[in-house]
Image (cartoon, helix red, strand yellow):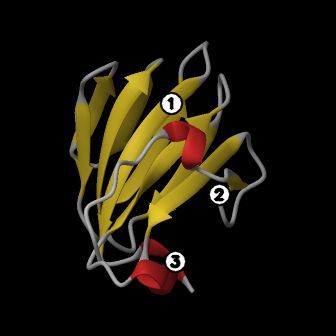
Amino acid sequence: MKLRKLALADATMERSPGQEGEIYTGNLVDERHGGPVTVGYGRWGAGSVLEHVMAVDDIMLVLAGRLSVSSDAGTVEIGPGEIAYMPKGERVTIRAHDQDTITAYVTSPHWREAEG
């Protein structure tokens, strides 16, 4: 794998697997590229909710908008420039606030392999 510049415009957004809400992911680096992690962007429609048991360690950075992430450990609200770390095995509920939200993420290992 070589040095690459990644931009939101390069991502092909697809509906996040296993849900019907307005939540989309766009991997730019994943198992198909030979890297050890998955790197991509997410787009969350206003009011979207995802309940999920994390199959991977996930680091999510909010670029625009706001999300609330809840687990048994409590709830954190993250906005532009803030990061949520969601460890593998944790049951989380992620809620977009009243505006669309754009995120960037890194997962280890690859989330498509772990959930497939």
Left/right of residue 30 with respect to residue 71 in the rendered view: right
Q: Is residue 90 visible to the viewer in this orientation of the structure? A: no
The type of residue carrying mark 1 is Ile
Pointers 2 and 1 in contact (C-beta within 8 Å): no
Pointers 1 and 3 in contact (C-beta within 8 Å): no
Q: Disc 2 and disc 1: Cα gap in Å?
A: 14 Å
Percent x, y for residue 31?
43, 82
Above or below, 13 against 63 in this view is below
Q: Which residue is mark 3?
A: 112
The type of residue carrying mark 3 is Arg
- Viewer-proximal residue, 45 or 64? 64
The numbered mark at residue 102 is 1
Pointers 2 and 3 in contact (C-beta within 8 Å): no
Left/right of residue 19 with respect to residue 65 in the rendered view: right
Callout 1 environment at 10 Å: few (<14), some (14 to 19), or many (20+)? many
Q: Which of disc 3 and disc 2 is earlier in sequence?
A: 2
Percent x, y for residue 97?
54, 19
Element on which disc 3 rests: helix
The numbered mark at residue 16 is 2
Check the image and name the residue furthest to the right: 20
Element on which disc 1 rests: strand
Percent x, y for residue 41?
48, 46
Q: Which of disc 1 and disc 2 is earlier in sequence?
A: 2
